[in-house]
Each structure stands twice: as structure tokens, then as C-alpha cells.
Amino acid sequence: MDDWLKNARTETKIDIEGYISGSGAIVVESADRIRKVARRIQVTITKKEHNGMTYYVQTVKLYQ
């Protein structure tokens, strides 16, 4: 991961997936609006540049 942060080109993405332990994360489906416990997590990190500065945009998705 550290190597990717140092050497990634702009607009490059990396996905990290795993399972969640415990019951602290909740998923609300738009179809039925019922709360359910999340079991999996996916984090996407995208390297972006704006006005000469580097940013790492993080997107988190939770799944049942």
C-alpha cells in the first residue's frame, strides 16, 4: 500500500476489500429502507491532482 501511495499515477485507483467484524456498520437498502448489518466493506482510493496538489479520494461501500 505504501508503495502505491508513493508511485501511483494520477487517476489511478486501488480497491481494498474485507469483512467487517462486529455490528457497528449498517446498510439501508433504497428499495425497502430496512436496516441490515453490513458484512463486507470495499474501499477505493483514487489519486487525483487539483491546482498542482495531490489528493487521495476515498470511496467506501458497505455490503450485506
Image (cartoon, helix red, strand yellow):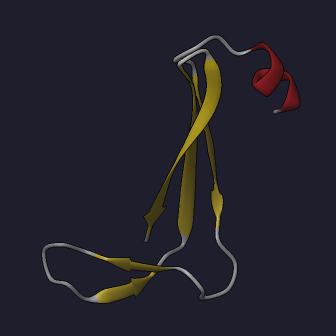
Q: Is residue 44 left or right of residue 33?
A: right
Q: Position of residue 10 (x, y in %)?
A: 58, 14
- The residue depicted at 54 percent of the width and 72 percent of the height is 39
Quadrant in the picture for the C terminus: bottom left
Q: 53 or 17: which is nearer to us?
A: 53
Which of the 4 quarters of the picture holds residue 18? bottom right
Q: Is residue 22 left or right of residue 63?
A: right
- The residue depicted at 20 percent of the width and 84 percent of the height is 33
Q: Is residue 42 left or right of residue 28?
A: right
Which of the 4 quarters of the picture holds residue 28? bottom left
Q: 58 or 26: which is nearer to us?
A: 58
- The residue depicted at 53 percent of the width and 18 percent of the height is 51
Q: 6 or 36: which is nearer to us?
A: 6
In the depicted structure, whether residue 45 falls above or below residue 8? below
In the depicted structure, whether residue 3 falls above or below residue 32? above
Q: How many marks?
A: 0
